Image (cartoon, grey):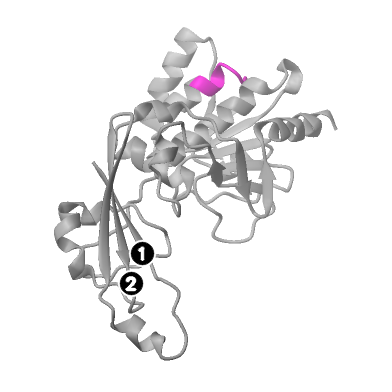
Amino acid sequence: MLTALSVRIPEQPSGVRRLAHRLRRDKVKITFRRARGVTLKHVTYISYSGQVRLEKTDSVIGMQRSRLLCADNLIFPHNSGYRRFSSRSFKQRLCTNTALAVLKALPPDAALRLGIADIYGGFPEFMLKALRCCGDVTVLTRGGEVYAEAQELALNELGASAVITSRPEDLRGCDLVVAPDSGCVLPDLGENTVVLAVEPPSLERSEQWYYSYKIQVPGGFDGIKPEELDGEYFCSALYTLGEQYELGSMVPERVEGSGRTRTIETLCASLDNRRQK
């Protein structure tokens, strides 16, 4: 079961009624919603005082307090035991799914050069899938042993191989760089390079950097999603906590980052035009 916490602060009346409003007791409302085998307990805290007293929700939230679904502007006290659910697993799938969708949609003569920034060696399967669509792949990693095994498999099954390197500068010249994990510091790749990542860059970059993946919550699940939760975030909880692993095959409708918005089609058009210049 998933547990979501929403906070609602009713509009404050004016004049004499304002004091009476503030003296009203806060309320906790609980609803259960079900869809496709998933149950969501939705706890709504109605605050007349303008504060959130977590002791009022302790008994109804219980052990779920360490993985609560809630808006990102809801901040809990450090020692309260309450934590907002957070996981990158689903977003990493969206990142690599977007890249594969682009590779499959490009024309065969696009001659795209793909870079994969995978410092910790967690995505060799993505490299294998990419090699089925792209013949020029460079992987930046410290997980050489993991990728050596993937390389052998690629040679045996596909007759293809990638360049495996620990030098970040070897990604220069790539048209598309996929960074499905954090912790990788990329060199300046130039304004013509598209980067698909799971987090925004820490500093201003020249590349076209995309890190927000916009999806349509699948039918059924859209009816139980709390209004204030982003679709990507809610599906991440369904995927990670609700074990709805079929969502891992989703491809975003569009990607956003650094003030830009692209669909799969416009990403392909941009990459294809660049190679023709």
Tell me if residue 240 is in the magenta stretch: no
Relative to 267, say whether 148 is above or below.
above
Which is more toward the observer, 19 or 185? 19
Relative to 257, say whether 250 is above or below.
above
Q: Position of residue 226 (x, y in %)?
A: 40, 50
Q: Secondary structure at mark 1?
A: strand
Left-right relation of 141 to 75: right
Numbered label attached to residue 47: 2
Residue at the bottom extreme of this rendering:
16
Number of numbered discs present?
2
In the rendered image, which quarter is residue 120 located in? top left
Q: Position of residue 97 (x, y in %)?
A: 52, 30
The span shown in magenta is 129-135
Left-right relation of 166 to 33: right
The residue at 14%/60% (across/down) is 59
Q: Is residue 80 visible?
A: no
Q: CA distance from mark 2 to mark 1?
A: 7 Å
Numbered label attached to residue 62: none
Q: How many other residues sit within 10 Å of disc 2, few (<14), some (14-19) or many (≥20)? A: some
Q: Which one is earlier in the sequence, the residue at label 2 or at label 1?
A: 1
Q: Where is the N terminus found, in terms of image quarters?
A: top left
Q: Secondary structure at mark 2?
A: loop
Left-right relation of 125 to 99: left
Q: Position of residue 90 (x, y in %)?
A: 41, 38
* Residue type, label 2: Ser
Q: Where is the C terminus found, in terms of image quarters?
A: top right
Q: Is there CB contact under 8 Å for labels 2 and 1?
A: yes
Which is more toward the observer, 269 or 184? 269
Residue at the front extreme of this rendering:
16
* Disc 1: which residue: 7
The residue at 60%/38% (across/down) is 177
